[in-house]
Amino acid sequence: QVQLVESGGGLVQPGGSLRLSCAASGFSWKNYRMSWYRQVPGKGRELVAGIASNGGSTDYADSVKGRFTISRDHAKNTVYLQMNSLKSEDTAVYYCMADWRLINRVYWGQGTQVTVSS
């Protein structure tokens, strides 16, 4: 059974930090590029950060560069999103996504809420 389980969301004050985790199981995770997306009500999902299957390259949305860091731990089948200097505009539901373009396979997690507010 394929699972992507996000955790680590919550309420944080502006300027604070959170670390999101996404634990993968049920598929050959090491072959998949991993990404974090976010979505606010009434808008489509926005790519926040991505990391290659081997962890060798990363990319970020301009709005989070220098504040967020994506990483993956192959021993734990987990991808992380370290979020620092959080702003109110970072408030959203954050989703983990796994994709392997070679076989056109995509999996999504259920999402975790991040709220940045004083």
Image: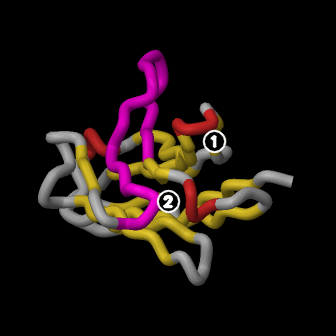
The residue wearing badge 2 is 10
Q: Which residue is mark 1?
A: 108
According to the image, what is the colour scheme of the structure? secondary structure
Say if residue 19 shows up in the picture. Answer: no
Relative horizontal placement of residue 8, taking residue 62 as reference (left or right): right
Is mark 1 in CB contact (under 8 Å) with mark 2?
no
Looking at the image, residue 28 sits to the left or right of residue 65; the answer is: right
The picture quadrant where one finds residue 55 is: bottom left
Q: Is residue 31 visible to us here?
A: yes
Furthest residue in direction top, as rendered: 42
**In this view of the protein, which residue sits in the foreground, 9 or 103?**
103
Q: x, y percentage for residue 113? A: 53, 48
Q: Label 2: few (<14), some or many (≥20) within 10 Å?
A: some
Q: Position of residue 86 (x, y in %)?
A: 24, 57
Q: Amino acid at mark 1?
A: Trp
Q: Residue at x 31, y 65 (%)?
A: 56
The part of the chain drawn in magenta is 36-55
